[in-house]
Image: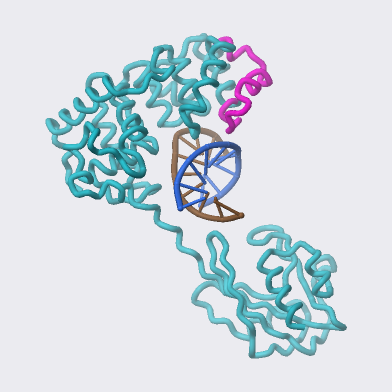
Chain colours: A cyan, B brown, C blue
Amino acid sequence: MSEQWEDIEWLAALRQSMLDWFTHQQRDLPWRRTNDPYAIWLSEIMLQQTRVETVIPYYHRFLERFPTVCDLAEASQEDVLAQWSGLGYYRRARMLHAAAQSVVAEHDCVFPSTFESILSLKGVGRYTAGAISSIAFGLEKAVVDGNVHRVLARIFEIPHPRGSKQLDQKCWQIADTLVKGDAPGDLNQSLMELGAMVCTPRNPTCMLCPAREFCQAQTNGTQETYPHPKVKKAVKQLQVMWGVTRRRGKILLIRRPQKGLFAGLWELPGVYLDAGETPSTEKLQDVFAQMGLEVDVDESFTSHAHTLTHRQMTIHLHKCKRPKGKISLPRKEWCWVTVEEAMELGVSSISRKVLLQMKKAT
DNA sequence: ATCCCGGTGT
DNA sequence: ACACCGGGAT
């Protein structure tokens, strides 16, 4: 990635091109017809995680019902939630209401006009504070949302993957530079509008893009590859050894600890091994020994694979013969049950899968 | 049906 | 890091 964004003249030209485009091509949206910071704040909160078309009718109704921040502050939470009903993410409404009350209490009913004071409102993070302070108050504060990530990642061919801290930091750095100058609110909105209307995730219409001549990805035909996909979290390999002990046609199950993986579920006794550890019958034998049971662990085993969100499990199922001794665990933590009965208990789906195969095998 | 996405708060 | 929660894509 080049450092073009440090070239002042180049940057000024890009900036101007964005502003010109926004002036002529912006959608006519209700919150663009006001300079009331309260209304702009409301729109930004509603637009978090919610589409423009969905928000529009709610925005009108809400402002009609609560025309000023004082009206909102004085309303009951019930009233506020009723107006919000259907928009989803109801926590936003509760925080909005609380923030309105703090505007009344701490700012004398006047919507705060500095970035820091706006940022301190409940439910307002860096993005929303930047949006309100630039759009409503003309402050040179940047915004970086999902659209801006995409637009800037393409213009500058930022190599860092979606969701990475590096991509986010680079975008804020560039946006902070770009926002300095005339009409910072319009500049911010132009980036987001471009992302929404032109620089779309797929099939961007680069022909219509004001940043076309500035865009490295467009030059290289790599638009759709930016931002690069999120690095998938490494799936943790997990080796599991389970022992099947039979006594009078029943098998022994134990209950897992109340915390962590499969908390509180019933399971065959066994041992979880991290990647790198080698399964051995001794390890399984030890587990039984610690429960007070001496067993003969078969060397042979059946193998079962199971995938969870962040783990790839491989289960080695061993028969454990001739159990001797008395189980030393608390009585509530173990039970002898038939395979059928086991299916009725709380077991994980991998346990269910394994139990089902045991049932078929017998 | 199942993944992927995203501002903020925790 | 994850939960919130709903929408859209596949």
Provide residue A25's location: percent of width, then percent of height: 29, 23
Asked if residue B6 is positioned above or below residue A61 in the image, the reply reads below
Q: Residue at x 53, y 26 (%)?
A: A122
Does A263 sit left or right of A345 as displayed? left
Asked if residue A193 is positioned above or below residue C10 in the image, the reply reads above
The magenta-colored residue range is A70-93
Does the magenta segment cover residue A137? no
Q: Residue at x 39, y 13 (%)?
A: A33
Q: Residue at x 69, y 88 (%)?
A: A297
Provide residue A217's location: percent of width, then percent of height: 23, 46
Quarter of the image that includes the C terminus of chain A: bottom right
Does the magenta segment cover residue A79? yes
Does A340 sit left or right of A312 as displayed? right
Provide residue A106's location: percent of width, then percent of height: 52, 14
**What secondary structure predominates along the stretch shown in magenta?**
helix
Provide residue A207's location: percent of width, then percent of height: 22, 36
Asked if residue A338 is positioned above or below residue A204 in the image, the reply reads below
